Amino acid sequence: MRHKAPVIAYGVHESGRREVIGIDVGEAETGAFWREFLRSLRARGLAGVQFTMSDAHEGSRGSIASVMGAPWQRCPVHFLRDMPGHCSKGQQPMIETTIRQIFAAEGASEAAERLADVASALERSAAKVARLLLEAEEELLAFVAFPPEHWSKLRSTNPLERVNHEIGRRSDVVGIYPNDSALIRLAGTLLVEQNDEWLVERRYLSVESLQAITQRPRTKRVQGGGHTTGGLTPSSRRRTDTTKRDLIRAGRAAVK
């Protein structure tokens, strides 16, 4: 028996709607696996990515940088979950509350100032936390370059966690899969349903606010990372249909 890593890519296209754009299974989340996965998305038509967001898995960070060429947002929720390993148990509630204040800022300059102030305040009591916070500033605050009305949906992977949790719950029920296609079949069925729901739900981001993003020159600053990834992606209806066919085809292949 071998443990494998399923990865899923989601996007938000210029209509403001969310969309499932890819799924794959690998032996591990290595750089080589992530490069192959991201290049497969590009080969199927993914282009003009404005922003990427994911967990900070080492294997994906450089891959997102080299393949996508878009700014990367590190999920602050997962960053906070890592901090207890760098401070005493008694400090944990205080550190979590203090760092969360950074993301309550109302502007980009205020967010940067708050991060600097928090790092300075923690320098004596939790020096490693302060150092990690300063080192991660660019990737933790990448979202502030976008309209404020987008911030709550761009700064963490939490909006994706419900879907991922349901896939994990159902995959645990099955337990062991005969091959990768069987796992993709199960996850793909759920993702097709979720994709259809997103297409008829209220827009995730407004068209008006997205126009300011899609019409501006794109920054080249980027870093990588993550178990799931999402982004602002100029898209077309063609790619939505292609994604569905790919997921359904993977499911049928597993049945044969």
Image (cartoon, rainbow, N blue to C red):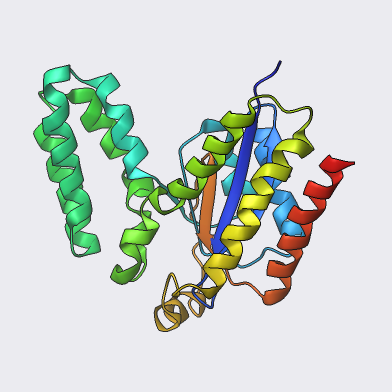
As drawn, 91 above or below 237 = above
Kindly tell me whether residue 136 is visible in this rendering. no
**In the image shown, does 94 or 252 lie closer to the viewer?**
252
42 sits left or right of 66 in the view:
right
In the rendered view of the protein, which quadrant contains the C terminus? Answer: top right
Residue 31: image location, x then y, percent: 64, 34
In the rendered view of the protein, which quadrant contains the N terminus? Answer: top right
Residue 59: image location, x then y, percent: 58, 33
Residue 154 appears in which quarter of the rendering?
bottom left
What residue lies at 33% left-to-right and 43% top-to-bottom?
76
Kindly tell me whether residue 163 is visible in this rendering. yes
As drawn, 88 above or below 153 = above
What residue lies at 53% left-to-right and 67% top-to-bottom?
198
* Label total for image: 0
**In the image shown, does 194 or 111 lie closer to the viewer?**
194
Residue 250: image location, x then y, percent: 79, 48
Residue 147 appears in which quarter of the rendering?
bottom left
Residue 174 appears in which quarter of the rendering?
top right
As drawn, 173 above or below 205 = above
9 sits left or right of 82 in the view:
right
Residue 121: image location, x then y, percent: 9, 35
What residue lies at 51% left-to-right and 71% top-to-bottom?
17
What residue lies at 66% left-to-right and 75% top-to-bottom?
236
Q: Residue furthest bottom?
A: 208
Q: Residue furthest front?
A: 173
